[in-house]
Amino acid sequence: MMCQKFSVILLHWEFIYMITAFNLAYPITPWRFKLSCMPPNTTYDYFLPAGISKNTSNLNEHYEAVVEARFNSSATSLSNLPNTTFHCCFWSEQDKNCSVHADNTAGKTLVSTVNSLVFQQIGANWNVQCWMKGDLKLFICYVESLVKNSFKNYDLRVHLLYVLPEMLEDSPLVPKKGSFQIAHCNCTGRECCECHVPVPTAKLSYTLLMYLKITSGGVIFQSPLMSVQPINVVKPDPPLGLHMEITDDGNLNISWSRPTLVPFQLQYQVKYSENFTGIMREADEIVSSTSLLVDSVLPGSSYEVQVRSKRLDGPGIWSDWSSPHIFITQDVIYFPPKILTSVGSNVSFHCIYKNESKTVSSKDIVWWMNLAEKIPQSQYHVVSDHVSKVTFPNLNATKPRGKFTYDAVYCCSEHECHHRYAELYVIDTNINISCETDGYLAKMTCRWSANPVQSLVGSTLQLMYHRSSLYCSDIPSVHPMSEPKDCHLQKDGFYECIFQPIFLLSGYTMWIRINHPLGSLDSTPTCVLPDSVVKPLPPSSVKAEITVNIGLLKVSWEKPAFPESNLQFQIRYGLSGKEVHWKIYEVYDAKSASLPVPDLCAVYAVQVRCKRLDELGYWSDWSSPAYTVVMDIKVPMRGPEFWRIINGDITKKEKNVTLLWKPLMKNESLCSVRRYVVNHHTSRNGTRSEDVGNNTTFTFLWTEQVHTVTVLAINSIGASFVNFNLTFSWPMSKVNIVQSLSAYHLNSSCVILSWILSPSDYNLMYFIIEWKNLNEDDEIKWLRIPSSVKKYYIHDYFIPIEKYQFSLYPIFTEGVGKPKIINSFTQDDIEKHQNDAGLYIIVPIIISSSILLLGTLLISHQRMKKLFWEDVPNPKNCSWAQGLNFKKRTDIL
């Protein structure tokens, strides 16, 4: 017991160490290496029993047995143990040279004085591996003792001392002892420890110098100096996002994402296994891309895959394996499983069909569309024994069916169809892009509608464009150096994009890219030249007026400043009101235009717009409306028609004459009447005028035998040129040429007036018809009618039981003749006039009815002929009827 305690005391003695001068530190390798501390004058073979090769794995298996045997056989007294110097060195399977001489003061060894019988006999060994963590922040060294169970009462403690220079060129060959820092090491149990050295990202290429202090069994060992550039021993994180899918070609695509933060290219090792109905297949491949294709994928198979990564060029350490990922193929495999394409294209689906445990022959596969339409066999193709292909040529757009926006393509055997199907999306990519440049030539606005692709769920639309240096190419095409343009959806359902600034003579090639998880499609490209799509500003300073004396609608305007090319103009005009019925008038490269209008005294609304004369670009917006002002254009076309009322004793020579006339309409007065003037002409007093203002009646005294009056209309331009004259003559008032006058009451709104004249030598100009209701104090109503008329329809309100007076005045050039006056309706022959009046209505009705009846008879005759003679044979076609005379009667009964 006392002997064992004394041994423990001796094992905890402090050792004396020194660092000899050395020229080169041990370069840390990307793989695992060993630290061995040996008694003097020994070689690496000292550790191995007879028959054991210099293999690291064999050493790991037998080292513990060697230590155990020599420890148990030791019976030497601890008080008599000599001081032993151990030489420690690094070696690996790639470099097994670990022979160091004690007297070599220039060697790379640590000399230790150890009072331990066990280590004097067998030495000590550890597995060491160092790497830079994938986040590029932490350098890790892992130390594992080869003695697993022999020294159960001993604790393993490890310290790592390191130095990292401040600058790349400051790395000394022999750093000072005080410059080393101690790294944190975490030991689990008695077998392994892990040491962490923080390394700034900026110093990944610096040389890190370090050495190990290992305490085991109460004995302290110190390793030789080690050196490493952390960037050369990076151990990446395992690849991320391991994924498997069937490609469009029917292969299995294994893909993953590379670890983040790694500043160099990686290579990947992929190991996978395939299980098809109990048959296993394993493979291991190294690739430089982040995907691997596996051929000959079969339905109903399962695949298990793992991936790890390592630096592609230069030294590095393999990462840990990723977590296993399992993928199971379905009994029916479609490749591709979904297709997105455009109208008019040709696409194909491939299929492998497994029925229970047997793969169906491709010759026995049939194809269906939506399980409702069998696809013709002419569209089938046998690719291999088990792969069938169907092709759809010149596709039309898919019609949505409820929530389904695709067509389901089924691959079936001759007797049944599996519930799985492929999806076919066909969309119309004919998207029209229209652009216009504003009138200031500062920006170009492009618009397009997304209606053709709105039903495709999950799709996004993006306008792509490429600007050439000058003009457009003859055939626009999708350019690889394209840029996206931000477009915003407007309330009218159109997307709008604005290019600003613009280059007027540069060609902008544009197309719509439809992005979808299944892929992307491009619409037909179009090229736009901003200078060719200018929408000018509307003409300004628009004015409209009816020209004086000429009587035309004159419109004037100022043309916009841009574009500077010649312009054409459209004028639209119409009567002002709630609803203007526009008329269009075009002029070219002008600033004004005059055009005729039907009504010179109405208010017209006028607008003007413009466009380039070479037809490029767009019409501008209409200008703000301009309105004409009603004003006098010309002198009145004529004076008013007038009549008179004579009051006074017929036996006296003086009578009061009252002139009556109706106000002139606007189209006659052009456009207003300010006043009326009555001109008198007599043999005694000559000619005189009287201004009656705006009155429509005027009374004067008729005293001379002949008195001629004329009524003139006057506006701001002048007096009317054409006027009516009326001559009052005592002699002519006795001339009677009207033999008879009859008035026939046709209905409550019409009376027929007819008369008979006797021959006369006077020049008859016209008639004046007067009528009034004798039972009421109504004003006299009158009409002026031509002299050639012998019968006239008076339209007014007539009551049959009332008494009316009708008068017919012949008006001669010489004066007013004697009137014919009747005070009642004519009763005899009234029916004759009524029949005459109705004849104008009855005759057209009779003619129309006759034509209709004749047409009906002709149609009926043709139908009867066809009905009765349809089965009568043609004698020329019947042998039995040859020679018979069908026109001759034959009694066969």
Image (cartoon, rainbow, N blue to C red):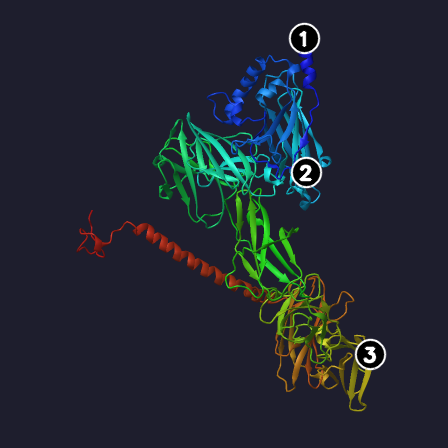
Relative to the observer, which residue lies in front, 707 or 819? 707
Residue with the mark numbered 1: 1
Sequence-wise, which precedes: disc 2 or disc 3? 2
Tell me if I can see residue 592 in this picture.
Answer: yes
Numbered disc 2: secondary structure: loop
Relative to the observer, which residue lies in front, 221 or 641? 221
Q: Amino acid at mark 2?
A: Val
Q: CA distance from mark 2 to mark 3?
A: 118 Å
Numbered disc 1: secondary structure: loop
* Relative vertical location of residue 805 with respect to residue 373 in this rendering, above or below: below
Between label 1 and label 3, give the one nearer the viewer.
1
Residue farthest to the top, as pictured: 1
Residue with the mark numbered 3: 692
On the image, the x and y values in percent for residue 852 come to 45, 59
Quadrant hosting residue 698 = bottom right
Q: Is residue 715 left or right of residue 215?
A: right
User: Residue visible at 54% across and 43% down?
Assistant: 313
Q: CA distance from mark 2 to mark 1?
A: 50 Å
Q: Amino acid at mark 3?
A: Val
Q: Amino acid at mark 1?
A: Met
* Relative vertical location of residue 576 with respect to residue 547 in this rendering, above or below: above
- Disc tally is 3
Residue with the mark numbered 2: 199
Q: Is residue 414 left or right of residue 179?
A: left
Q: Is residue 251 left or right of residue 842?
A: left
Between label 2 and label 3, give the one nearer the viewer.
2
Quadrant hosting residue 786 = bottom right
